[in-house]
Amino acid sequence: MESIVEVKHLTKRFGIFTAVNDISFSIKEGEIVGFLGRNGAGKTTTISMLMGLLTPTSGTITIFGNDLQKHREDILARVNYSSAYINFPRRLSVYENLKIFAYLYDIPNRDKRIEEVIDLFNLLPLRNTEYNLLSAGQQTRVHVAKAFLNTPRILFLDEPTAALDPETAHDMRKLIVDMQKSHNISVLFTSHNMAEVEEICDRVIFIDQGKIIAEDTPWGLAGRLTISKINLLIKDGLKRTLEYAQKHNFTASQDGRYLTVEVADRDIVYFLNFLSEKGIVYQEISIQPPTLEDYFLQQGRKKS
Amino acid sequence: MLIRNFYVWFRDLDRLFDTFWWAFFDVVIWGFFSTYFSAGGTNILARILSGTILWAVLARSQWEVSASMITESWERNLMNIFTAPLTIAEFLFSSVLLGALKLMIVFSFMAMVTLVFYRFNVFALSFWIIPLLGSLFLTSVWLAFFVNALVLRYGKGVISLAWTLIMIINPISGVVYPLSVLPRPLQMVAQFLPSSYVFEGMRSIIDRGTMNPSLLLVSFALNGVYLLVAIFIYWYTFKKAREHGWLIKLA
């Protein structure tokens, strides 16, 4: 697969503060890349540079083989952006808002394309409704609909489902993935919802304090952790189990009779043997392998 | 609630303007006006109404040119606009067109109101009205560009400058009184203001039916210089806004 975004040695300084520090990565055609990091890690700064809103201090951004600084308008015509943190003009209807962007992106057969997008994103009942009268979920659908108006080759999505309830977020993710696959669109996707990232991203780039600290598939990153969680509902033997965990330096958290013990993969069999040999009585047991969220939290603990 | 409002009173530019700015200019402008008319004057209605109309045209079209960027910032739509393939020149050009449209609407509306309410016909200024309006429009454009550059640089905290900064030029433009009423130092400052020539020309037309074309020439020449400077300031500030992240903060 060809790379359509190439970022090389990208740095951004604001005075003495370095927000993005010599990062390099690429995005391939048709790929969904998750761009993760804590608040203040440098995600928004990086995306702002990719969208031409912010000039890099050094480094290059090449999109479709062209330097973004020199070919900004040409590149932006084939790119689009959506974020949970921006709005549209409140007094304009859904249709009017989409029409303005259809003009801005100089889309051929404007009216036809607007109607297609309205249909694809189930916005027909809301077509003539003012933007400020829409719910958060409906507004998000309009944001994402606008992002697909010009059938972009690259889409930058900044926490697109942040304001949504789980069911609506799930529907939105499905819509994004369906549209992405049908048009082979490359996506750079930021989110704080690790489950969402695991669900849809082909690859994840993890940034912290302006530097890329990891780059892998979601399960590849999670697999770097060797600690699993064993969840138990203990009927008898809670105290003995806690003592065992403490003795072997396993992290344990308790909520009534529910116990979660973090155990290194190599020690799981010994822990299970202990439960059996000591006659610990439990009603429920589950072993949860490490997730992307666990990796994210571990990175946070390392920094603090 | 008193404490809550008191905390922001002296930190909020809007509050400060509301408390001091308007009060100051009300007193200054009406003070000069009273000084002039207490010494006796002719064609009072024509002078006041023509001045009011032309000033409103200047102020409203300046606000309209400024509003394009400011309302996008208020609506949190600025990022959508500047991530589209729109050049800054196209953005500014559309703002200027909106300002021109606003000028024509405001002028027509006020002309109609003064005719109906006071039987005053602003078109008594004859064909001169066109270059007078043209000069005022150019003034509104460079002022708006300058204000928007300030907003880009200093952010939402100074947005109120979009409708307040123009008041600085009101007293020294001689909107409803001649410049001779002003103290000498202010008269010298007025010489560098394109709008002062417009209002002097307006009074000349009202009193004598004609005006010296050199007034307009000087006005347009000054507007030309200031427009070029304002365009450069805006372009440079926008470049810096992208370097320093001011655009994202505004968005």
Image (cartoon, coloured by chain):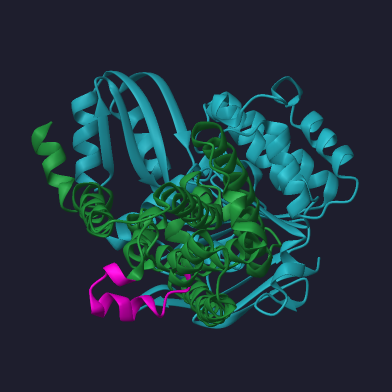
B56 or A21: which is nearer to us?
Answer: B56
Q: Residue furthest left?
A: B3
Residue at image location 21% in from the left, 50% down from the top: B23
B171 or A221: which is nearer to us?
Answer: B171
Q: What color was chain A assigned in the picture? A: cyan
Residue at image location 24% in from the left, 48% down from the top: A249
Q: Give the number of marks.
A: 0
- Quarter where residue A15 is shown: bottom left
Q: What color was chain B assigned in the picture? A: green
A53 or A66: which is nearer to us?
Answer: A53
Image x and y of residue B61, in percent: 54, 55
Q: Is residue A62 covered in magenta?
A: no
Q: Would you place residue B114 above or below residue B70 in this image?
A: above
Quarter of the image where the N terminus of chain B is located: top left
Determine whether, in the image, residue A278 is placed left or right of residue B99.
left
- Quarter where residue A28 is shown: bottom right
Q: Would you place residue A243 above or below residue A297 in this image?
A: above
Q: Does residue B17 appear anywhere in the picture?
A: yes
Determine whether, in the image, residue B21 is placed left or right of residue A128.
left
| Residue range of the region highlighted in magenta in the rendering | B180-195
Image x and y of residue B129, in percent: 61, 59
Q: Is residue B186 covered in magenta?
A: yes
Residue at image location 80% in from the left, 46% down from the top: A181
Q: Does residue A265 appear anywhere in the picture?
A: no
Image x and y of residue B57, in percent: 52, 53
